[in-house]
Image: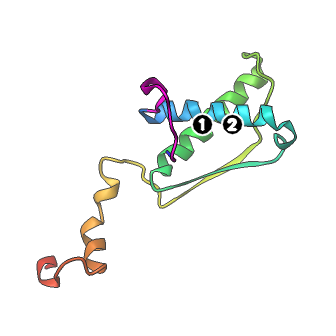
Amino acid sequence: MGYSHAERTFDIAQNDYQYTKDALSFIKQFYSSWPKLASNPLYIAGVSYGGMYAPYLAWAIHQHNEEVIMGNTNETLKINLKGFIVANGATEWSTDPFISTVDAAYHFNLFDPQIYK
């Protein structure tokens, strides 16, 4: 996601699970660097493939907060997650991007109407 750079192949997120771990790590480091912002409400948004990222990250934050509350971690920061939104989100990547591809191409005049029929 984004335009990141990694020196080692190992550091490149290869799947949604690794992305979620990396994003949660970033959020915790961000609030460690700017603790005054930690009390602000956090909303997560995802568009398209973000329909996979946003719920995973929201769940990971929820799990993190539960661990903090139960005292099962040395961390004390409870992330002030207020919600997440997914707009036009993919939920099953093996099919979602292909459902309306032909219709969309037709309506953008990318091929002759005779072929569409």
Range of magenta residues: 2-13
- Percent from the top left, x then y, of residue 15? 42, 34
Could you tell me what secondary structure mostly forms the magenta stretch?
loop
Vertical side of 113 occupied by 30: above or below = above
What is the crowding at mark 2: few (fewer than 14 residues within 10 Å), some, or many (at least 20)? some
- Percent from the top left, x then y, of residue 42? 73, 47
What's the amino acid at mark 2? Ile
Viewer-nearest residue: 14 or 42: 14
Inter-mark Cα distance, 2 to 1 = 6 Å
Mark 1: secondary structure: helix
Q: How is the image coloured?
A: rainbow
Q: Is residue 3 magenta?
A: yes
What is the crowding at mark 1: few (fewer than 14 residues within 10 Å), some, or many (at least 20)? some
Which quadrant of the figure has residue 22? top right
Which quadrant of the figure has residue 103? bottom left
Q: Is residue 62 magenta?
A: no
The residue drawn where x is 76% and y is 24% is 68
The residue drawn where x is 52% and y is 41% is 4
Q: Residue furthest bottom?
A: 113
Identify the disc placed on residue 27: 2
Mark 2: secondary structure: helix
The residue drawn where x is 81% and y is 40% is 38
- Percent from the top left, x then y, of residue 81? 72, 43
Residue at which label 1 appears: 23
